[in-house]
Image (cartoon, rainbow, N blue to C red):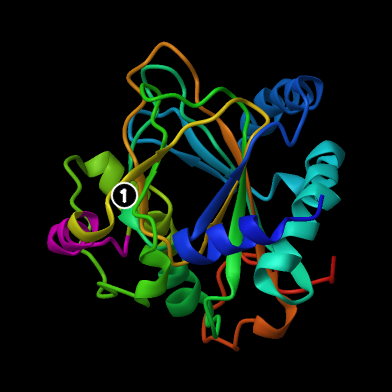
Amino acid sequence: MKLERNQIDFYAEKGYLLLENLFSADEINQLLREMPGIIGEDSPRRILEKNGSVRTFFAPHLDNLLMNRFATDERLLTPSRQLLQDDIYLYQSKLNTKFAMTGDWWDWHQDYTYWKKDDGVKQPQMLTAMIYLNDVNEFNGPLLVIPGSHDSGSFDEEENKVNVEDEKYEQYVLSEKYLTSLTADLKYTLKQKTIFDWATEKGLASLKGKAGSVLFFHCNLFHASSNNMSPWDRHTYLLTYNAISNFPADVLERRPDFLVNWNPTIL
């Protein structure tokens, strides 16, 4: 699928683009049927909520043919090439789960801060394509964004102190250095004043849509989501693409391969 000029301009202005009905109901149902077996695997790639439910499963494309097929689908690749204006490769993939009544929040943050500071990515020439696996409504934790905030550069980059309430979870967090980038206690979050100032100027958008929709969003876009207190699941499959010219610099301690693709292939 090739984007029209007005769609490219909208992304450039707002930092995101929502395309409805990009995937059929049958295709989405295939992904949903595969998901329980994937996230049920006891693996370092599986990140849990504090309550023990699954939050994220990283790199499902590595060993699942269906997930890999979606990650390399031209309906995602062609728009990503257009928006990044370069050849691209898959930087990261993950299933984010927000089960009914249990799905946790994601605090306000910018994705690029992690990729720059933890992985040495040189420029914010990256985007994420989020496939909606369920209908996303105002009740089940839709992605909240500040339109136009992707032009802000990087904000509030100092490392946050993780606030843990019980010894068991504290040991869980300390067991893996990268974990605090992935749980509800994010390492780099945006300050309340930053969000207040930008939201006052630019407003907020709640990016709702039907299952099969795809949201393309810039790596510097301010975004967050609330708990899922509804009776409906809100699951997503996220594919992050990087410009091939923007490969990470060498860092002293590389994050695991399931978080960062250190051996890219042009798509």
Quarter of the image for residue 133 reads: top right
In the image: residue 55, left or right of residue 260: left
In the image: residue 247, left or right of residue 74: left
Position in image of residue 39 (x %, y %): 62, 32
For image coordinates 78% across by 26% down, the residue present is 24
Q: Is residue 146 magenta?
A: no
Quarter of the image for residue 105 reads: top left
Q: Nearer the viewer, residue 143 or 165?
A: 143
For image coordinates 50% across by 72% down, the residue present is 115
In the image: residue 257, left or right of residue 51: right
Mark 1 = which residue? 171
Residue 55 in sight in this render? yes
Badge 1 marks a residue whose secondary structure is: helix
Name the residue furthest left. Answer: 193
Name the residue furthest top. Answer: 231
Position in image of residue 146 (x %, y %): 34, 54
Kind of residue at badge 1: Gln
Position in image of residue 158 (x %, y %): 25, 75
Quadrant in which the C terminus appears: bottom right
Q: Is residue 189 magenta?
A: yes
In the displayed structure, would residue 226 be above or below residue 59? above
